[in-house]
Image: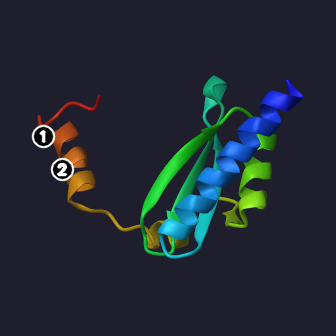
């Protein structure tokens, strides 16, 4: 189990680091419990691009963001949300879900 956890941490660290490099050289992260599926690592790059990854445990999530060298926020607050850039795809998805557009699959 420890070897699997270590592999998952290493993979997440690599993904987080690559995200930060692709999106302005840095990123902010916030870790949130989402039930039995694990913990969501929400990322916002310096350029405003955002995304998320899943970790099986809080320890794996915390170890990965620390190893990747990104700033970790206690909560997904207004300051973090203010940095997010939302594009046409996201707006179409949000409106579509409420106005009879494409289904959320």
Question: Which residue is painted at 77% across and 41% down in the image?
Answer: 60
- Please tell me how crowded label 1 is: few (under 14), some (14-19), or many (20+) other residues with Cα within 10 Å: few
Number of marks: 2
Q: Is residue 91 among the parts visible in the rendering? A: yes
Where residue 94 appears, as percent x and y from the top left, is: 25, 47
Name which of mark 2 and mark 1 comes first in the sequence: 2
How many C-alpha atoms fall within 10 Å of the one at disc 2: few (<14), some, or many (≥20)?
some
The residue furthest right is 2
How far across and how far down the image is residue 39, in percent?
Answer: 65, 38
Q: Quadrant of the C terminus?
A: top left
Determine the residue positioned at 66% across, 32% down.
38
The colour scheme used to paint the residues is: rainbow
Q: Are marks 2 and 1 in contact (CB under 8 Å)?
A: no
Residue 24 in the image: state x and y as whole percent.
50, 76
Instruction: Kindly identify which residue carries mark 2.
Output: 92
Q: Secondary structure at mark 2?
A: helix
Nearest the viewer among 99 and 27 is 27
Q: Is residue 42 left or right of residue 92?
A: right
At x 45% / y 72%, what residue is drawn?
Answer: 82
The disc label shown at residue 99, or none: 1
On the image, the x and y values in percent for residue 26 come to 59, 73
Q: Is residue 78 left or right of residue 10?
A: left
Q: Report the residue at 46% width, 73% height from top.
A: 83
Q: CA distance from mark 2 to mark 1?
A: 10 Å
> Left or right: where does residue 95 sit relative to residue 33?
left
């Amino acid at each position: 189990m420890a070897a699997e956890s270590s592999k998952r941490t290493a993979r997440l660290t690599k993904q987080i680091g690559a995200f930060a490099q692709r999106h302005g050289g840095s990123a902010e992260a916030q870790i949130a419990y989402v039930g039995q599926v694990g913990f969501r690592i929400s990322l916002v790059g310096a350029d405003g691009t955002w995304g998320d990854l899943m970790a099986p445990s809080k320890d794996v999530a915390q170890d990965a963001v620390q190893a990747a060298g990104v700033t970790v926020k206690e909560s997904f607050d207004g300051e973090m949300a203010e940095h997010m850039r939302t594009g046409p795809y996201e707006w179409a998805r949000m409106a579509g879900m409420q106005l009879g557009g494409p289904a959320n699959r």
